[in-house]
């Protein structure tokens, strides 16, 4: 029998690389179609969103490059770590995302993976536009200034 403390309902994995390389304008909460061993690995926190991106095909949205490590207790039913996973969004939301991504420079990037109150894994995807090098420098400078102000307060 599996121990209860190994699985957590308070998993929250952020894609910090996305916030560094992109400016996120809109965010959407999407459900995912997962296999049994995938949700168990997510509850253990063994997920990487660093290389993940989303694409739309045939009025459906998929996430590619998201790595969910194989479940340690899984047998021959274990999942493929980097398989393409379907996201669950409303048709209107998918059409909004499709229209925006057809504009130059926009892409869909996963920003956060978490488990909601009901126990379902949710992926927060954001409509992103790439930053230039000077934008990255400005955001790093602002972050440093905020950190210094915070230290001065305490």
Image (cartoon, rainbow, N blue to C red):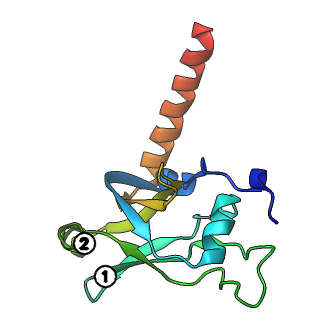
Residue sitting nearer the eye, 126 or 117: 117
Q: How far apart are marks 2 and 1 (CA)?
A: 7 Å
- Give the percent coordinates (x, y) of residue 65: 56, 77
Q: Residue 126 bears which disc, if any?
A: none
Residue 60 — which label? Answer: 1
Residue 65, placed above or below residue 96: below
The dot on residue 94 is 2
Point 36% across, 52% down: residue: 24
> 83 and 26: which one is in front?
83
Q: In which quarter of the image is the C terminus?
A: top right
> At x 61% / y 81%, what residue is drawn?
82
State whether residue 49 is above or below residue 147. Answer: below
Q: Is mark 2 on a helix, strand or loop?
A: helix
Is residue 41 shown left or right of residue 2? left
- Count every numbered label the image shows and give the total: 2
Please tell me in which quadrant of the rendered image residue 66 appears.
bottom right
Residue name at image x 75 percent, y 54 percent = 4
Rendering coords of residue 49 (x, y %): 57, 64
Task: Give the side of residue 52 with respect to residue 98, left or right.
Answer: right
Where the N terminus falls, by quadrant? Answer: bottom right
Q: Quadrant of residue 73?
A: bottom right
User: Dot 2, how many residues are within 10 Å of its Cα: few (below 14), some (14-19), or many (20+)?
Assistant: some
Q: Residue furthest top?
A: 153
Does the residue at mark 2 contact the one at mark 1 (Cβ under 8 Å)? yes
Residue 87, x across and y down, in percent: 40, 73
């Amino acid at each position: 029998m599996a121990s209860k403390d190994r699985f957590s309902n308070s998993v929250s994995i952020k894609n910090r690389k996305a916030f560094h390389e992109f400016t996120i304008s809109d965010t959407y909460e999407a459900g995912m179609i997962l296999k049994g061993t995938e949700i168990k690995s997510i509850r253990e926190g063994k997920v990487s969103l660093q290389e993940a991106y989303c694409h739309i095909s045939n009025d459906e949205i998929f996430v590619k490059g998201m790595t969910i490590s194989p479940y340690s207790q899984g047998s021959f039913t274990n999942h493929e770590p980097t398989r393409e996973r379907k996201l669950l969004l409303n048709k209107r939301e998918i059409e909004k995302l499709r229209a925006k991504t057809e504009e130059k420079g926009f892409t869909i990037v996963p920003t956060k993976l978490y488990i909601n109150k009901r126990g379902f894994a949710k992926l927060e995807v954001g409509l992103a536009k790439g930053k230039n090098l000077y934008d990255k420098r400005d955001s790093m400078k602002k972050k440093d200034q905020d950190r210094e102000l915070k230290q001065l307060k305490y």
